[in-house]
């Protein structure tokens, strides 16, 4: 069966989509904290080293794999070695798993836009988040009821994903022209406002002040590689799917450099918005900056609302702006994760794109309701840990081994250079064959040893098995089944 394949309307549309996929919530609530914790300005040394030895090489690898196969991750792996299709399906299923809980986080953002209008969290943003918004139970063993307001937010999120992907790449190319610049504009406004507040300089100083002694700690370098891997959407099937819609003469290396640098630039700039606000909070409460530093959901939904409440004017406006920024950051990543699964599934089944998107969205919505129950945050934390630390690292490691040793890094490098404005040299081969797989292998083995010897997060062993190891085993089993079940269709 021959399937006609559409292409991106413009190179800009592809780059914006790739950047939108890469830039997500973690750029705001994870990178600034990782940078601060691992040496401040000195962290940029291992970070850029990781970017050039892992980030750019893997970006190019996933772009060229998708383009040459004219198919998603499973078809890309199958075109290298037929028996490796399962690895592509593993990437798709990891992406799907991530989007099921990612949409739950976006549901929080929908609700907080509404709460910001009246600063509903009052004087205790922590209790409001945990007891009112999430209504958290005592542990993962007590799911409790689905939270009504969060259910509305979840419906809105999945409806937005379906609407954006309705016409496939054509609609995505148009949407990202709006949804990618919008959070950048919001972040600029928030950074300008933050930098004008008292105490902002102290916050930014804590963010950037270099501690070069940290560079002697191997964990700092591993943190840099982890941040690069996760923040660029590597190993999530997204970039291969997007690249499969590129014309066969499309540039690879320059697109990868632009995607990586734009993502990293946003992450770095986000630190100014975050730490200027944290400096203001420290000034207001009379405590050192390090005492108010948070990351992850606590930063976004507890610390930042506390900061917003103390702004001297226009607090509701900046509250709405902040959570609108989170929403627009999240939606690009969310629909790209769905597209990463929808593209290869559409190619494998030979059915229309929108049918696949609707079915993925329905199943994702049903699974996602777990994460908006009273015990949902516990399960979100467990699943996120296992899929990120094991699933994505494994996929990236397999990519390096398959390309570097089975297919031949030099051979693929020649394909990249044939159509690229910036020609890459033997450093790419060395990174793909040696540097990146060695570091990822060490990362994976050390994570496995720690995960086996002690349950993650202090959760019960049974919860780690169900939401962690059991989930990983199930995803791998389904990936192998799909790799055997579906054969590649000819694409023109």
Image (cartoon, rainbow, N blue to C red):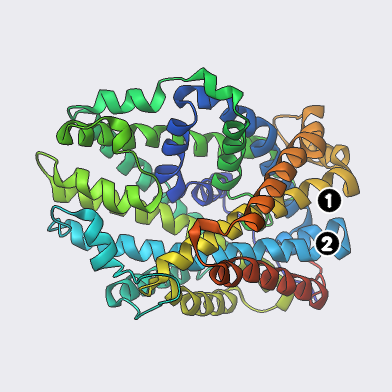
Name the side, left or right, on which 324 lies relative to 421. Answer: left
Instruction: Provide the residue designation for mark 2.
Output: 84
Identify the image quadrant of the C terminus: bottom right
User: Could you tell me how far apart the alpha carbons at marks 2 and 1 are, in whole angstroms?
Assistant: 8 Å
Q: Is residue 134 above or below residue 267?
A: below
Q: Nearer the viewer, residue 165 or 362?
A: 362
Q: Is residue 359 above or below residue 472?
A: below
How far from the left and from the top, in percent, is residue 30? Answer: 44, 43
**Residue at horizontal 84%, vertical 43%?**
404
How far from the left and from the top, in percent, is residue 385? Answer: 55, 57
For label 2, the crowd category at 10 Å Cα-Cα, with few meaning under 14, some 14 to 19 and many 20 or more, is many
For label 1, the crowd category at 10 Å Cα-Cα, with few meaning under 14, some 14 to 19 and many 20 or more, is some
For numbered disc 1, what is the local secondary structure?
Answer: helix
Identify the image quadrant of the N terminus: bottom right
How far from the left and from the top, in percent, is residue 10? Answer: 57, 48
Q: Is residue 235 visible?
A: no
Instruction: Provide the residue designation for mark 1.
Output: 402
Name the side, left or right, on which 242 lies relative to 199. Answer: right
Q: Nearer the viewer, residue 81 or 34?
A: 34
For numbered disc 2, what is the local secondary structure?
Answer: helix
First in residue order: circle 2 vs circle 1:
2
- The disc at residue 210 is none
Name the side, left or right, on which 115 lies relative to 390. Answer: left
**Residue at horizontal 88%, vertical 59%?**
81
- Count the labels in the image: 2
Residue 410, quarter of picture: top right
Q: Is residue 148 visible?
A: yes
Kindly check if marks 2 and 1 are in contact, taking CB atoms under 8 A apart as contact: yes
**Residue at horizontal 34%, vertical 31%?**
272
Q: Is residue 272 above or below residue 205?
A: below
Residue 370, quarter of picture: bottom left
How far from the left and from the top, in percent, is residue 290? Answer: 33, 32
């Amino acid at each position: 069966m021959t399937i006609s394949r559409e292409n991106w309307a413009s190179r800009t549309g592809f780059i914006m989509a790739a950047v939108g996929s890469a830039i997500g919530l973690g750029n705001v609530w994870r990178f600034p904290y990782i940078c601060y914790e691992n040496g401040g300005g000195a962290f940029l040394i291992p970070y850029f080293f990781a970017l050039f030895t892992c980030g750019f090489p893997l970006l190019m690898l996933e772009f060229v794999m998708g383009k040459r196969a004219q198919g998603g991750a499973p078809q890309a792996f199958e075109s290298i070695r037929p028996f490796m299709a399962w690895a592509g399906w593993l990437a798709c299923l990891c992406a799907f798993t991530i989007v099921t809980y990612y949409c739950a986080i976006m549901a929080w953002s929908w609700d907080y836009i509404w709460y910001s209008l009246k600063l509903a969290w009052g004087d205790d943003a922590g209790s409001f988040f945990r007891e009112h918004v999430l209504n958290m139970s005592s542990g993962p063993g007590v799911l409790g009821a689905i939270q009504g307001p969060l259910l509305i937010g979840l419906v809105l999120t999945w409806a937005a994903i379906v609407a954006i992907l309705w016409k496939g790449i054509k609609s995505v190319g148009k949407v990202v022209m709006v949804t990618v610049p919008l959070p950048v504009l919001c972040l600029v406004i928030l950074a300008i406002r933050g930098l004008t507040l008292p105490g902002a300089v102290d916050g930014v100083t804590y963010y950037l002040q270099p501690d070069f002694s940290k560079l002697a700690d191997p964990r700092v370098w591993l943190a840099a590689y982890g941040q690069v891997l996760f923040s660029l959407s590597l190993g999530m099937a997204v970039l291969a799917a997007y690249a499969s819609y590129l014309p066969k003469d499309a540039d690879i290396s320059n697109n990868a450099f632009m995607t990586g640098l734009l993502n990293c630039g946003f992450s770095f700039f986000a630190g100014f918005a975050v730490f200027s606000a944290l400096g203001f909070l420290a000034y207001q409460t009379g405590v050192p900056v390090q005492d108010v530093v948070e990351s992850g959901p606590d930063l976004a939904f507890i610390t930042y609302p506390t900061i917003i409440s103390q702004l001297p004017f226009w607090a509701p406006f900046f509250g709405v702006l902040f959570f609108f920024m989170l929403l627009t950051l999240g939606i690009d990543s969310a629909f790209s994760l769905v597209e990463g699964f929808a593209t290869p599934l559409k190619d494998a089944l030979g059915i229309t794109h929108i049918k696949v998107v609707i079915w993925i969205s329905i199943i994702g919505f049903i699974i996602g309701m777990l994460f908006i129950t009273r015990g949902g945050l516990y399960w979100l934390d467990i699943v996120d840990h296992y899929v990120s630390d094991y699933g994505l690292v494994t996929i990236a490691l397999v990519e390096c081994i398959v390309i570097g040793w089975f297919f031949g890094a030099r051979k693929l490098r020649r394909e990249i250079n044939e159509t690229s404005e910036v020609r890459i040299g033997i450093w790419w081969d060395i990174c793909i064959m040696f540097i990146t797989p060695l570091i990822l292998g060490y990362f994976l083995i050390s994570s496995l040893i720690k995960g086996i010897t002690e349950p993650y997060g202090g959760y019960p062993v049974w919860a780690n098995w169900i939401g962690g190891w059991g989930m990983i085993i199930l995803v791998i089993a389904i990936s192998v089944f799909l790799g055997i079940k579906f054969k590649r269709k000819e694409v023109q």
